[in-house]
Amino acid sequence: MKLIRINLKTNSIIQEEIDINSEYFLFGARGLTSNIISNEVNPHVEPLSSENKLIIANGLLAGSPFPNSARTSVGAKSPLTNGIKEANVGGRGAMMLARYGIRGIILESISDSLKVIIINEKQVELKNAQEYEGLGNYELHSKLKSKYGDKIGIYSIGPAGEHLMKSATVAANDLEGYPSRHAARGGLGAVMGSKKVKAIVILPPKVSNVPMHDLKKFRETSTPFAKVLAETKQAFSTFGTPMMMKGMSGYGALPTKNFRMASFEKIAKISGEALHDMVIKRGGKKRLACSPTCVIKCSNLVVDENGKHITSSLEYETMCLNGSNLMIDDLESLAWIDHYCDDVGIDTIEYGGTCGVAMDSEKMKWGDSERVIEILNEEIRNNTKIGKIYGNGVKHIGQLLNAKRVPQVKGQGLSAYDPRVMKAMGVTFATSPMGADHTSGAAIVSRVPRQDREYGEYLDDEHKLDLSFELQVYTAVMDSMGCCYFIGPSYENMELIASALNAMYDLELTRKDVIEIGINILKTEIEFNRKAGITQEMNDVPDFFKREESNPHPLKFTFDKSELLNFWKRLEAHEY
Ligand code: SF4
């Protein structure tokens, strides 16, 4: 496997081999992005300066038949959190890069003019991209497909990335060909925009350079696992993440009205079941895979009443932050908000949180979906003064408006889980080196990292620090493999990953070795953040979650500050 290092100032493109003796041999995806940032980026650099680097990497299991293993990690020093950041995404690119024998691409410095990077059988080349300047992701992808063919893989930025907005995403095209998948969190699209790279286009490889030592042995692990996942995730496949709308409202944990409440009286109108019925009735699609090798297929494709594509895939976090959180109660508006976020290249979670603060500060009316869409499609797209206010995230607008209720941690907006109720998720928000990112350790009600341990009732604090910690470690492993965490960040699955890696790379790893991959990634990230000024003292949620009770459960966030301060000492004393 190799790394492609592209200096956008000098146009130099260098290939670096990753073999068994390389320091990066056992680093994939998040493990690779975080280690390269730690080794090569000064923690004090300004995130949108030429000294920052953007790394795009696939996982250690990419290119293999391991289920759900073709995700891409995008990493850099984040303009939103000012710390280390990784966001991962489905789409086509990871599998294609793996087949070219490419594990990662490092973008360095800043180009003089807008560029597109083309990867084909013969070479990696930089091309002028002036013709694509200012385009939304939909038009951009359509033009790139006309030029390079329908089967290309794409990573790209929309206008928000070009305008260096701190909520900007890196888009990837899905298996239906739409720019619907986004490495959304942390403003990594702004880092790509700062380098003046509009898109990376990967032409389909003709042969595969994926290493596979013993395919038969590999399949002895991956095939039964894929079968179990396909059989046991049927409801999730049918309804996808939107099924959590009703569930979270019922649990009293659904952020509503800028986290003033945690259940929504009009939930039936924007539930996963309502979305399912709308999609089926209009002839949209369900049970879609967002990337190759996915056996769960939780994605959807939403069409209008004439059967024309609006968006794909409409997910729980988008529906919650832009639905109940803004008191918007119609699915049509939510589908269009998702569409315009994808087109301009803005994180739906950060945007919903930002609008929530604006509505709470009476700058917008609750439920005003037209204005929410107008800000995306006109203000952010055209980089107006208002666009800059709404494109730079929850913390930014909170400071501008001197708001008292600003749901963010370490600069990143809270995702769709009330931390007073979803206790372990609250711990993840408070402690993750990524800021308030649910994907770092998604402690939802049913998810436990070990079957042989007790984690207490979801409304109690008991065992929730350990629950969050274990999920964060196992999730770091999954992220490093390029695997979707819906296959289960669990102690049990660490054994399967060890077996798969051994068969693929001719290794003799144990479960303990694999867990240490996750522990080392977290140590690296925490140390980078410490040097960057993102310290353990910042492990906390905003004060209003400690002051105000949630509703309907009269609960506050009650973890002791010292418990959060010392949370990561568990990395030194972890029991395998
Ligand atoms: S389970 Fe869903 S999010 Fe995960 S890889 Fe499959 S389609 Fe994508």
Image (tube, rainbow, N blue to C red):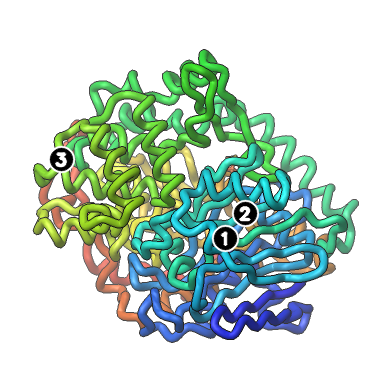
Q: Is residue 116 above or below residue 423?
A: below
> Which three-letter amino acid code belongs to the residue tagged 1?
Ala
**Camera-nearest residue between 433 and 309:** 309
Q: Is residue 19 above or below residue 428?
A: below
Tell me, yes or no, whether the two marked residues, 2 and 1, touch with CB atoms within 8 Å: yes
Q: Kindly identify the residue that appears in the image at 39 percent across and 40 percent down.
A: 318
**Camera-nearest residue between 297 and 309:** 309
Give the distance between the C-alpha atoms of the residues marked 3 and 2, in whole angstroms: 35 Å
Instruction: Find the residue positioned furthest to the top.
Output: 281
Q: Which is nearer the N-term, disc 3 or disc 2?
A: 2
Query: Which quadrant of the frame does ligand 1 lie within?
Result: top right
The answer to whether any part of residue 25 appears in the image is yes
* Mark 2 residue CB less than 8 A from any atom of ligand 1: no
Q: Which is nearer the N-term, disc 2 or disc 1?
A: 2
Q: For mark 1, what is the residue?
A: 199
Mark 1, other Cα within 10 Å: few <14 / some 14–19 / many ≥20: many
- Mark 1 against mark 3, which lies toward the viewer? 1
Q: Kindly identify the residue that appears in the image at 18 percent across and 50 percent down.
A: 545
Q: For mark 2, what is the residue?
A: 154
> Which three-letter amino acid code belongs to the residue tagged 2?
Ile
Give me the disc on residue 58: none
* Quarter occupied by residue 225: top right
The answer to whether any part of residue 451 appears in the image is no
Point out residue 378 in the picture as x, y percentages from the top left corner. Answer: 31, 45
Give the distance between the C-alpha atoms of the residues marked 1 and 3, in whole angstroms: 34 Å
Q: For mark 3, what is the residue?
A: 364
> Which three-letter amino acid code belongs to the residue tagged 3?
Met
Point out residue 440 in the picture as x, y percentages from the top left corner. Answer: 45, 57
